[in-house]
Image: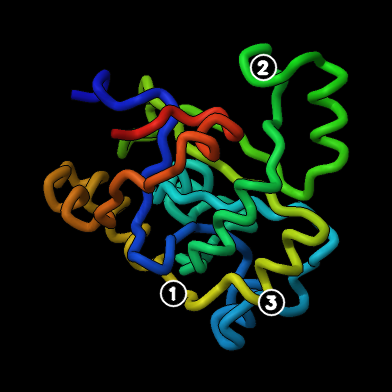
Amino acid sequence: MQDRIPARQIRAVHTDTTITVYQAYPREIAGPALAAGTFVAPFKRERMTWIKPSFRWMAYRCGWGQKPGQEQVLALDLTRDGFAWALEHAALSHYDAKFHASQQAWRTEVRTSPVRIQWDPERDLYHRPLPHRSLQIGLSGEAVDRYADSWITGIRDVTPAMHAIRGHLAAGRVAEAERLLPGETVYPLTPELAASIGADVSH
């Protein structure tokens, strides 16, 4: 079944107006963000911030909320318009001859774009790499300002779910762990937008 999934496809929790992404932070950043409904100090806007639509990739990255500095995991609902802006203003993190006329063209794109796109192997519940990829989006400069000021419509703390899933897995209760996973489905992209970020067009 896994080999039928396109290599590069956005899968996420989404509605007609929003898409959910994940980030993990220390409590001193996550707590004020939860209280304010967006990122506030000590969150630093001058740093690149990475958002991830895949819950399982976030779980892999933060070790189910166990890694230092990533103890609190947030689910953030973004406007689809904001998410589209991010994709439209993105550059791929790595040169790919299929999408760039030259390495110089790619370097120029990276230098002038406020958003980075990175495709990393998706992970199963045991953090093992899968054949298909998961999207990461790095926001910097104008993109971070837009993210914090206008894209975020809601923030939830999903750390308890991360810990619960980890506990189920440790006890061998795989079915119970799977039931706690959010229901992520294919996020629709136009052929033009899919091509610009190196995604496979979904049918």
Q: Is residue 114 left or right of residue 2?
A: right
Secondary structure at badge 1 equals: strand
Q: Nearer the viewer, residue 14 or 68?
A: 14
Residue under label 3, please give it.
149
Rendered residue at 82%/16% (across/down): 103
Secondary structure at badge 3 equals: helix
Secondary structure at badge 2 equals: loop
Residue 156, numbered label: 1
Three-letter amino acid code at the position of disc 3: Asp
- CA gap, disc 1 and disc 2: 36 Å
Classify 198 as above or below 55. above
Q: Quadrant of residue 49?
A: bottom right
Three-letter amino acid code at the position of disc 2: Asp
Q: Quadrant of residue 124?
A: top left
Disc 1 + disc 2, Cβ < 8 Å: no
Task: Tell which circle, 1 or 2, labels the residue nearer the N-terminal end.
Answer: 2
Q: Is residue 162 left or right of residue 178?
A: right
Q: Select label 1 or label 2 by which is in front.
A: 2
Label count reads 3
Q: Is residue 178 left or right of residue 197?
A: left
Three-letter amino acid code at the position of disc 1: Arg
State the image coordinates of residue 12 (x, y, percent, origin top left).
37, 51
Task: Tell which circle, 3 or 2, labels the residue nearer the N-terminal end.
Answer: 2
Residue under label 2, please give it.
96
State the image coordinates of residue 163 (x, y, percent, origin top left).
35, 59
Classify 62 as above or below 194. below
